[in-house]
Image (spheres, rainbow, N blue to C red):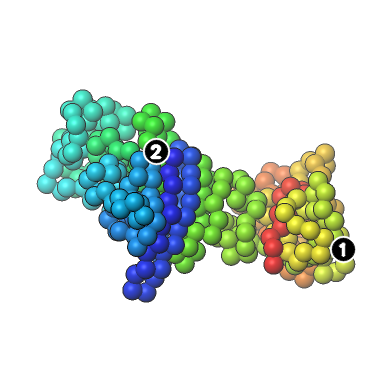
Amino acid sequence: MIEVKVEKRLKDFKLKVSFSSRAPITAFFAPSGSGKSLTLQTIAGLIKPDKGRVEVNGKPFFDSERGIDLPPQKRKVGYLFQDYALFPHMTVFENVAYGARSRDKVYELLKTLKIEKLKDKYPSQISGGQKQRVALARALATEPEILLLDEPFSALDRSLKEELYGEIREVQEKFKVPVVLVTHDHEELFELAGWIVILEEGRSVQEGRPQELFFNPSSLKTAKLLGHRSFIEATVVEVGKSSLVKLPSGKLLRCRKGEFRPGDRVFVSILPNSLSLSLTDEVNRVKMVVRRVKKGMEIDKIFALFEGKEVELHLPSSLSPNFLFQEGRESTFYLSVEHLPLIRR
């Protein structure tokens, strides 16, 4: 379990982060300059907070009230930097062995991360993905109590990232070490994290499980950060198993249930995947004017006019009927209630 509640004032920035996670992998998600890496550094002991507390699996790393501030070497933190920070004059084996308690541990990690054949090579002789594995092995060789990953996949291509996602999960499960990941990549976020902490200008503004957070963003800004794209203003009319809202045109739309009351002013998020492919789901039958269509190998993106706003809808290419591709045509769409979350205005 990881518990963090820290404050730190810097020259032009104030960090105020609070979260608690029991998930195997926790992710900090935010745009650049929001304090993600700074928060990692307070956990690692590289930056001392002005006040607060940092605790990992019941062990206090920092507690301003109790006068506890463990130095970095006593926190047993594995830290994986964006640039890997491998020692160029050492072989792969020597890099991983640096700080390791035993040679057996080094061989185990080389095998787990599939880099045993590289053990005699130098960092300049291996690829970016291989360097990533070496850096991860070195971070784990010290048998850390927590593993911190600072945007570790940002320089890698998509296929290599997907391969490494599986290895991160495998490593976490095998060594039972809690992981904190810094990212601004949506795929990374939902592929790896069991708990998400949203940061905004140095503050933690929302935390929760990925699905819960995605469907219940606390603000329009957070919704956009999480990948929501199309919004319609509305007013809540009725709340039950779902929420009934009134649109600017006066039409009614049934949406996902949330913590709202009749009269609340909200945004309806029209998610790209809100098109229902089964009429057995609870759906809304709406008419929209198709403005343009971008055909893809797997997904077609349909841009349509709804309540005076352009919305983006996705449909598997194999299921896209040709008549939808006629620009300017009014077509009927079925929108899933469960994929129409509400956001408070």
Relative height, residue 280 to residue 38 (above, below)? above
Tell me residue 212's x, y (percent): 62, 47
x 38%, y 45%: residue? 55
Q: Quadrant of residue 318?
A: top right
Inspect the image, locate mark 2, and give the three-letter code of the amino acid beneath it.
Asn
Tell me residue 4's x, y (percent): 42, 51
Relative height, residue 160 to residue 5 (above, below)? above
x 35%, y 56%: residue? 64
First in sequence: mark 2 vs mark 1: 2
Out of 107 and 42, give the one closest to the viewer. Answer: 42
> In which quadrant is the N terminus drawn?
top left
Out of 52 and 322, give the one closest to the viewer. Answer: 52
Out of 107 and 36, give the one closest to the viewer. Answer: 36
The residue at which mark 1 appears reads as 251
SS label for mark 1: loop
Tell me residue 16's x, y (percent): 44, 62
Calculate the distance from the C-alpha at mark 2 to the C-alpha at mark 1.
52 Å
**Disc marking residue 57:** 2
| Marker count (numbered) | 2
Q: Image check: 263 left or right of 129?
A: right
Q: Image check: 315 left or right of 52?
A: right
Q: Is residue 305 visible?
A: no
Inspect the image, locate mark 1, and give the three-letter code of the amino acid beneath it.
Lys
Out of 248 and 176, give the one closest to the viewer. Answer: 176
Q: Image check: 222 left or right of 83?
A: right
Q: Quadrant of residue 41?
A: bottom left
Identity of the residue furthest to the front in this view: 66
Identity of the residue furthest to the bottom in this view: 12
x 81%, y 46%: residue? 241
> In which quadrant is the C terminus drawn?
bottom right
SS label for mark 2: loop
